[in-house]
Image (spheres, helix red, strand yellow):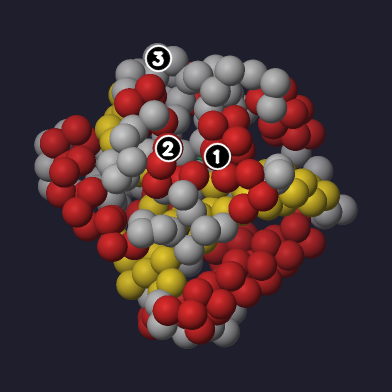
Amino acid sequence: MKHEFLTHATREEAVVFAAGMAAGVLETAIEDSGRASLLVSGGSTPVPLFDRLANTRLAWDRVTVGLVDERWVSPVDAGSNERLVRHHLLTGKAGAAGFVPMKTDAPTASEAVADRAMAYKPHCDPIDLILLGMGNDGHTASWFPGSKGLKQAMHAEAGVIVAAVDATGCPVAGSMPYRLTLTGPAIVDSDAAILLMFGADKRDVFEAALKSDPAEKPIRFAVDGLGPRLTVIWAP
Ligand code: 6PG
């Protein structure tokens, strides 16, 4: 059984659909267990989705939001995923949600792994809904092809949920190569996942990834592991 690939005519329509689906998944999780975890990616693609979700009616006080990955920069830096989420998702109605940061005062991402694993564990047991993105190099989360730590992150042992990655030299990671990321098992064990992508380039990269080695196009690892629990939502 494989993922579903949904095509929408416009990005706006894709966002409306993704927000409705996300709210439905979270609502069901809250009905079933009284709480829900929502783990989100950074980057530019999810911004309109965050804006829409922030104004969606939901028992947000029962939801804990966390990050799929984080750049090792200050939480007030323009490149910080925490900053993005605080500005676009944790406002309006969703302001009532809890938030678990990935960035800490630890000097390096590697030194924060044990502490963040403890903080994230209760919300990854399993994750109710994960929002993934994909870069033009085929990375998802901070699984950058050719990065140091990729193998350990993607192929972590069961129960290991956070890993550090050094993406120095990986073009898409640019000036923010030091990352903390959820691992392979944390992501593929999620109850539900949405991959939101825009543009023909990304659709082509995604299609190529389905025939590629996960070490070269790491999104493939998430696609294979999640199978039918993954919904890909795409618009031109
Ligand atoms: C990050 C992300 C990353 C992102 C992709 C897509 O912090 O870099 O979580 O995995 O989802 O790079 O980014 P865009 O949406 O900006 O293309």
From the viewer's perspective, is 1 left or right of 79? Answer: right
* CB contact under 8 Å: marks 3 and 1: no
- For image coordinates 55% across by 63% down, the residue present is 50
Quadrant position of residue 13: bottom right
User: Which one is earlier in the sequence, the residue at label 3 or at label 1?
Assistant: 3
Q: Closer to the N terminus: mark 2 or mark 1? A: 2
The disc label shown at residue 169, or none:
3
Give the residue at x 58% y 70%.
25
Mark 2: few/some/many CA within 10 Å (<14, 14-19, 20+): many
> Which circle's residue, 3 or 2, is located before the other in the chain?
3
Q: In this view, does 116 lie above or below 96?
A: above
Q: Which residue is drawn at 68% across and 71% down?
A: 20
Residue type indicated by callout 2: Gly
How far separated are the C-alphas under marks 3 and 2?
Answer: 22 Å
> Label 3 crowding class (10 Å Cα cut-off): few <14, some 14-19, many 20+?
few
Q: Pointer 2: what residue? A: 184
The label shown at residue 5 is none
> In the figure, 41 relative to 135: above or below?
below
- Measured as percent of width and height from the top left, residue 47 is found at 56, 56
What residue type is disc 3 on?
Gly
Q: Which of 77 and 29 is in front in this view?
A: 29
- The residue type indicated by label 1 comes to Gly
Q: Which mark is residue 225?
A: 1
Q: Nearer the viewer, residue 214 or 12?
A: 214
User: What x and y, as percent, mark residue 96?
Assistant: 38, 81
Whether residue 175 is visible to the viewer of this picture, yes or no, is no
Q: Are dots 2 and 1 in contact, CB under 8 Å?
A: yes
Mark 1 Cα within 10 Å, few/some/many (few <14, many 20+)? some
- Looking at the image, residue 131 lies above or below residue 236: below
Which picture quadrant has residue 133? top right
